[in-house]
Amino acid sequence: MSLKLIVKSLAWRRVTRRYPYEPHPVPEDFRGKVEFDPDACMGCGACANVCPPNAIEVIERPGEGVRVIKLFIGRCIFCGRCEENCPVAAVRQTDEFELASRSREDLEVLLKHVLAVDGEGHVMEYTERELAEAMELLATFEDRELVRKLGEYARMCRSCRVREGVNSIVKSLRPGLGGGEG
Ligand code: SF4
Ligand code: SF4
């Protein structure tokens, strides 16, 4: 290095950062650690369906009447698809990037959702929050008869819906049979 360059370099400002002794700023569109909003999440599982590395799982536990949404941050590739696809903006990517941990449990996030129960006490395949969200949406429809019918169907468990559907078909084909009750 020539003496001229050394003298010149004395006037230069430092270009490196003192990270980790001072915070390291990230760009505006940085895609960091994924975070759920537990108050907004309704447990629909749409984020899990679009997560390429299966970092988000939907664990059904109908026996306990719950569905668990489980995020394992250690598998996340920070693609942002969960944020793009959540219907209620309950998941977002933060600026956080310091995710090293000695324990796997530190990288797990669990959200437990209560499954809805129909009028006959059967556990449904929807969470209570999903059902509430659907009812809220239905309330905006103008056709009240359609709203009533859809509301009734939405409050039935899968087997009751199938039975009701079969009964309606039988009734329409053979009105005299009265739908084969039971
Ligand atoms: S898509 Fe949104 S509402 Fe549905 S489970 Fe994921 S975070 Fe929750
Ligand atoms: S950012 Fe991508 S990889 Fe990470 S949880 Fe969301 S969808 Fe999955």
Image (cartoon, rainbow, N blue to C red):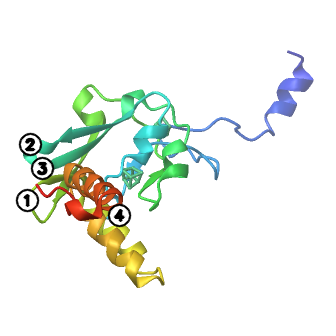
Where is the C terminus found, in terms of image quarters? bottom left
Residue at 81% over, 40% down: 11
Task: Check contact, mark 2 vs mark 3: CB within 8 A.
Answer: yes
Q: Position of residue 127 (x, y in %)?
A: 25, 56
| Ligand 1 is within 8 Å of the C-beta of the residue at disc 4 | yes
Nearest the viewer among 2 and 17 is: 17
Residue, disc 2: 63
Q: Nearer the viewer, mark 4 or mark 3?
A: 3
Q: Earlier in the sequence, mark 4 or mark 1?
A: 4
Q: Amino acid at mark 3?
A: Gly
Q: Position of residue 89 (x, y in %)?
A: 46, 60
Q: Position of residue 103 (x, y in %)?
A: 24, 27
Q: Amino acid at mark 1?
A: Gly
* Left or right: 157 as drawn, with respect to 119: right
Residue, disc 3: 65
Tell me the number on the disc at residue 121.
1
Residue, disc 4: 40
